[in-house]
Image (cartoon, rainbow, N blue to C red):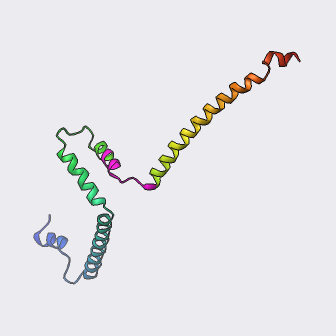
Amino acid sequence: MVTAGSARAVQEPRAGAGRCGRGALMAHYKAADSKREQFRRYLEKSGVLDTLTKVLVALYEEPEKPNSALDFLKQHLGASTPENPEVEALRLEVTEMKEKYEAVLEENKKLKTKLAQYEPPQDEKLGE
C-alpha cells in the first residue's frame, strides 16, 4: 500500500538532493538547444529550409494529391536544384563527343568501301 507521504517521496526528491544533477541536466539541454540552433541557422543559410518549404507548399496546393507524397518530394527536390555549371559543361561535351563519334563512324565506313575497291576479293587472296 502506498501512502501519500511515500508517493510524494518517490515523486519529489529531498530538498538539496540532486541540485548538481539538475544543473548538469540544464547545461546539457542548453548545449543541445545551442547545437539545434546552429544546425537550424546552417539549414537556413544554405537554402534548405526555403526549398523544403516551397516543395511542401507545392504538395499542399496540389489539387489531386499524389499516391506517394515521398515520390512527389523526391521529384520536386531534384527538379528544384540549380544546375551546376560544371555538369552542364560536361553534358555539352558529351553531346559534342557523340557527334564526333558518329562522324568518325561514317568516315570509317566510307574508307572501308573505298579500300574494298582497291583490294582483291578475299577468295583470290586464299588462292595465292
Q: Is residue 15 above or below residue 96?
A: below
Q: Where is residue 116 in the image (x, y as percent from the top left)?
A: 73, 23
Residue situated in front as seen by the camera: 1 or 72: 72
Left or right of residue 126, residue 71 in this image: left
Left or right of residue 45, residue 16 in this image: left
Residue at the extreme right of the image, as rendered: 128
Task: Give the residues drawn in magenta, as a range.
Answer: 75-85
Q: Is residue 111 above or below residue 69?
A: above
Q: In which quarter of the image is residue 3?
A: bottom left
Q: In which quarter of the image is residue 125?
A: top right
Q: Where is residue 24 in the image (x, y as percent from the top left)?
A: 30, 78
Decide whether the magenta segment is chiefly helix, strand or loop: helix
Q: Quadrant of residue 8?
A: bottom left
Reply yes or no: does residue 19 show up in magenta: no
Left or right of residue 110, residue 122 in this image: right
Q: In this view, does 6 lie above or below 72?
A: below
The residue that appears at 69% across and 27% down in the rendered structure is 112
The residue that appears at 12% across and 73% down in the rendered structure is 5
Q: Position of residue 93 (x, y in %)?
A: 52, 47
Residue situated in front as seen by the camera: 65 or 12: 65
Reply yes or no: does residue 76 show up in magenta: yes
User: Which quadrant is home to the N terminus?
Assistant: bottom left
